[in-house]
Amino acid sequence: MATETKKKTAAPKAEKAPKAPKTTTPKVAAPAVAAIHRRKELTGAVVSNKMQKTIVVKIERQVRHGLYGKYISRSTKFKAHDEKNEAKIGDIVTVVESRPLSKDKRWALQKIVRRAIQTAEANV
């Protein structure tokens, strides 16, 4: 008994066409303005300056009531860094977002928009 062993022959490989080089469009960088993180700015009134180099700024905003549609006044108080202790109670100031400076302080005084009106009683 002779057994014939059949060898498997590989099928002839079809030649692949050479790959065309990928044409990529040049990547355009995003505008410089979008790349820079813009810090938030808020404007409010100084309600306290009793701490050293720190002021408390009250930010007023109007929120619409969900059911009745009436606008309601809401306020938030932020502690802000005042390096030169130049802001006084009643001043309207602009604060800008900053890195955390303490447990509660994450804002810094940017500019004083309007000074508080000085009365004769305050000067005495």
Image (cartoon, rainbow, N blue to C red):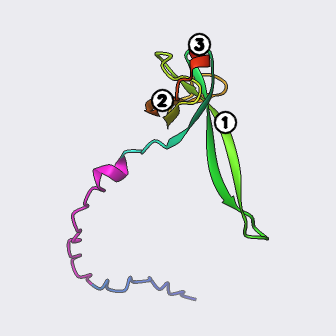
Q: CA distance from mark 3 to mark 1?
A: 17 Å
- Residue at (44%, 82%) from the top-left corner? 7
Single out the mark in the foreground, 1 or 2: 2
Q: Are marks 2 and 3 in contact (CB under 8 Å)?
A: no
Which region shows up in magenta?
15-35
Considering only order in the chain, which callout, 1 or 3, is on the residue closer to the N terminus? 3
Q: Looking at the rendering, in which quadrant would you find the N terminus?
A: bottom right
The one nearer the camera, 24 or 11, is 24
Question: Does the stretch in magenta take in 34?
Answer: yes
- Residue at (29%, 86%) from the top-left corner? 14
Tag 1 residue: 77
Q: Which mark is residue 115?
A: 2
Single out the mark in the foreground, 2 or 3: 2
Percent x, y for residue 113?
44, 35
Q: Looking at the rendering, in which quadrant would you find the C terminus?
A: top right
Q: CA distance from mark 2 to mark 3?
A: 20 Å
